[in-house]
């Protein structure tokens, strides 16, 4: 018996939600969305009550692990109790509600800074080493390699096999050179992850801010008060550089692959120990491309982290459009039996999908957002060493309930 129903129920819900999303996307592409009766969207359901999802019949229901109470979906006893679901997670009540988790975040957003991923990678590597997992038999993937900073932090502590992708050729060359000096188990690919395969995609070459978005649009974007985007000058400089490359017969382009398909067919890997995703607004499409609606891919990608921030804001020009919102992404992962955690300075805080609505207190002029790194662990397939590492560092908004 699973924590949220008979065996296979969670997979069925995940498959149903994925099917619903694909059907909705097809109708939008075909221009028929307005004319066809469709189930309510996750956003519309969230307006009715928190942590809900479409029920496939035009209504809403509570997500797995939640029950309806006083008009709100709240964690049920199985997901908040004393570990009776067999996960060994201990007290769930101490995780608090989404609102209480948001209060902890709002009190000190800096504790969940974007750069925590570097030190978090080093701590994870030490945990893997303690569990004797640092061998070439185990594989990690790093998307958004930049110059290889995060890869070096992880691989210096734990020499697993690593595949890193970087969409900017110049940065990929630097990363390849840097990692060759310290980490011979790493392979660098000049490539981008996405939700589909494409041979030639234009890249906004903004160095550490680069991504698969339009530099022209970023340079021209204005906030409601008329001020330019905070990266407008970087985008203008990138456009000048790209014009110079094109005059020399080059340009800034890359190929993209759907992550799930690439790992299976190109790398031939059935199991990935850990994945880190930092794609400057393309994270949702990468998660879509992991193919988590299929059980083998949930087994393959049982632990991964992804960056969230201003690039997820509704009107930010770096955000891939169309793509899932952060709330939609969290709901999808929840339905696919992933637990979500915010990565802190030296802690992990369990969060529920509604947290990403409650905690969206930052705004750079293009819509509210949450900033940080999110860790997703599959409840049944994550390696015990990774789960134990996270549970040892839990930050509980309601420790008094434990």
Image (tube, rainbow, N blue to C red):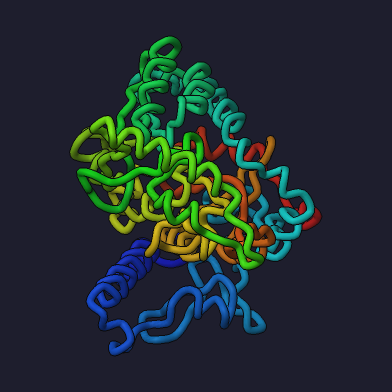
Q: Residue, x 31% and y 75% (percent of image)?
A: 24
Whether residue 129 sits left or right of residue 271 in the image: it is: right
Q: Position of residue 238 (x, y in %)?
A: 44, 40
Q: Residue, x 27% and y 47% (percent of image)?
A: 258
Q: Quadrant of residue 181?
A: top left
Q: Is residue 367 above or below residue 181?
A: below
Front one among 105 and 251: 251
Q: Residue, x 57% and y 80% (percent of image)?
A: 47
Q: Quadrant of residue 368?
A: bottom right
Front one among 158 and 237: 237
Total labels: the figure holds: 0
Q: Position of residue 160 (x, y in %)?
A: 40, 22
Front one among 2 and 333: 333
Q: Is residue 128 visible?
A: yes
Q: Is residue 3 visible?
A: no
Q: Residue, x 36% and y 38% (percent of image)?
A: 242
Q: Position of residue 140 (x, y in %)?
A: 40, 31
Screen quadrant of the N terminus: bottom left
Q: Position of residue 247 (x, y in %)?
A: 28, 34
């Amino acid at each position: 018996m699973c924590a949220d129903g008979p065996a296979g129920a969670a997979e069925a819900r995940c498959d149903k939600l994925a099917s619903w999303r694909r059907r909705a996307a097809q109708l939008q592409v075909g221009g028929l969305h307005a004319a066809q009766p469709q189930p309510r969207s996750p956003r519309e359901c969230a307006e009715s009550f928190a942590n809900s999802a479409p029920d496939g019949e035009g209504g809403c229901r509570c997500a797995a692990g939640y029950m309806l109470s006083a008009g709100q979906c709240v964690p049920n006893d199985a997901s908040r109790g004393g570990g009776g679901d067999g996960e060994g997670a201990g007290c769930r009540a101490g995780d608090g509600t989404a609102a209480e988790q948001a209060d902890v975040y709002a009190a000190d957003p800096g504790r969940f800074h974007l750069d925590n991923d570097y030190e978090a990678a080093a701590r994870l590597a030490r945990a893997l080493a303690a569990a004797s997992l640092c061998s070439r038999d185990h594989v990690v993937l790093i998307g958004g390699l930049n110059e290889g900073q995060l890869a070096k932090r992880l691989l210096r502590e734990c020499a697993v096999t690593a595949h890193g992708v970087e969409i900017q050729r110049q940065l990929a060359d630097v990363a390849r050179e840097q990692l060759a000096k310290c980490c011979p188990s790493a392979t660098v690919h000049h490539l981008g992850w996405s939700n589909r395969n494409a041979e030639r995609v234009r890249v906004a070459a903004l160095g550490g801010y680069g991504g698969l978005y339009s530099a022209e649009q970023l340079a021209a974007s204005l906030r409601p008060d008329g001020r330019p985007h905070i990266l407008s000058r970087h985008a203008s400089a990138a456009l000048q550089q790209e014009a110079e490359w094109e005059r020399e017969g080059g340009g800034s382009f890359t190929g993209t692959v759907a992550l799930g398909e690439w790992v299976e067919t190109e790398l031939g890997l059935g199991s990935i120990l850990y994945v880190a995703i930092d794609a400057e607004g393309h994270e949702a499409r990468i998660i879509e491309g992991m193919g988590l609606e299929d059980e083998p891919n949930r087994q393959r990608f049982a632990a991964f982290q992804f960056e969230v921030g201003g690039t997820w804001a509704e009107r930010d020009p770096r955000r891939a459009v169309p793509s899932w919102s952060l709330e939609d992404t969290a709901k999808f992962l929840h339905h696919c039996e992933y637990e979500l955690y915010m990565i802190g300075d030296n802690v992990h805080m369990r969060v529920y999908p509604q947290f990403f609505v409650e905690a969206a207190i930052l705004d750079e002029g293009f819509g509210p957002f949450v900033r940080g790194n999110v860790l997703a662990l599959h409840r049944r397939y994550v390696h015990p060493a990774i789960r134990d590492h996270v549970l040892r560092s839990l930050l509980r908004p309601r420790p008094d309930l434990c």
